[in-house]
Image (cartoon, rainbow, N blue to C red):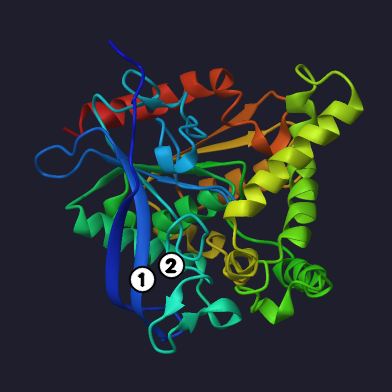
Amino acid sequence: MSTDLGTVADRSFFISNFRLQNGDVMPTAKIVYETYGRLATGGRNAVLITHGYTSSHHAAGRNPANRNLPGWWDALIGPGKAIDTDKLFVVSSNMLGSSFGSTNGASIDPRTGRPYGPDFPAITVRDIVAAEKALLDGLRVEHLVAVAGPSYGGYQAFQWAVAYPGLVDAIVPVVTAPKAQNVQSSLAELQARLAADPEWNGGRYYNTGGAKTVLTELRIEMLKRNGIEAALAPRYLDRESREAEIRRQAVDWAKSWDANSLVILRRGTIGYDTVKDFSKISAKVLYVLCRTDRLFPPSIAPGVMQALAAAGVDARYFEIDSDLGHSASGPEHAKWSPVLREFLGPLAATAN
């Protein structure tokens, strides 16, 4: 049996008159996505994969639009893998507001004929999940075996569990939390950093270079916080070569990222708190953190698990023993895929 999904392609879904949580209506919202496996008759064998803050929907296989590189959870998704595409239909959706094809700040506002820029609507995590729900409805998915994703993708997994409890059997939130902390201060700091770059121009930079200088520096800082130095150490033995590789990766990322997306998605977590709605959750939960993650350290796990237990939620916790921090879930797949396989196996067996 092959474990290679082979070539996968971007697909697009359009939502007309998409109403947001704040009452605003987007005339058109485009969602880009990938799929792996086949939807069973009845539409009940689907898994939704959600991605992190600055990553893409390219979770598995090789997509020419993403330089044919393997997806960030490629070792977890595919025939015979923990998320088994021989049994499951997997949808990996690009977030509304992200920079990899879905409607974002660089998209043309049909009401003005110009890029949205800083005038992009104030979407929330709830809106991002509602757009995913519309996408799944369009694909004739009737029920989800699971929603799984790391970091910001984990925010979405928790939101799915409280917003659509009857539609989801399980969630797998990874290196994440069920509520956001210190968003206002971190957003203000981000906006100040962007504003200090002469290329920023108040977020209206689409004819003036795209604010790539500040983007590159922010990306370098983010990669280091997320554990890239430990990941590169086996291949780049000296510090100078590691620094050069980190900068190369940051420059490459900045070429395809729209700076306004940093603000749009960070702002989208204001008020994000699913803990107060834990009593609505009927899904089983596999909560996964990493021993060395500085963004979502394991010290938060007891509080989360206690709150889930108090709400009567069937939840399990697993900690990835890795030095790779926030970025561990993909490269360290072997350390937690057996747990994921055991968790999803019984659910997948009854989904077809």
Outermost right residue? 239
Quarter-wise, where is residue 68 in the image?
Answer: top left
Nearest the eye: 214 or 13: 214
Is residue 299 among what the camera can see?
A: no
Placement of the C terminus among the 4 image quadrants: top left
Q: Which residue is drawn at 49% across and 43% down?
A: 149
Nearest the eye: 157 or 308: 157
Residue 62: numbered disc: none
Nearest the eye: 322 or 304: 322
Measured as percent of width and height from the top left, residue 66 is found at 48, 41
Q: What residue type is labelled 1?
A: Ala
Q: What element carries label 2?
A: loop
Q: What element carries label 1?
A: strand
Q: Name the residue under label 1.
A: 29
The residues bearing labels 1 and 2 have C-alpha atoms spaced at a distance of 6 Å
Measured as percent of width and height from the top left, residue 103 is found at 43, 67
N-terminal of the pair, mark 1 or mark 2, is 1
Q: How many labels does the image show?
A: 2
Outermost top residue? 1
Quarter-wise, where is residue 180 in the image?
Answer: bottom right
Q: Mark 2 points at which residue?
A: 103
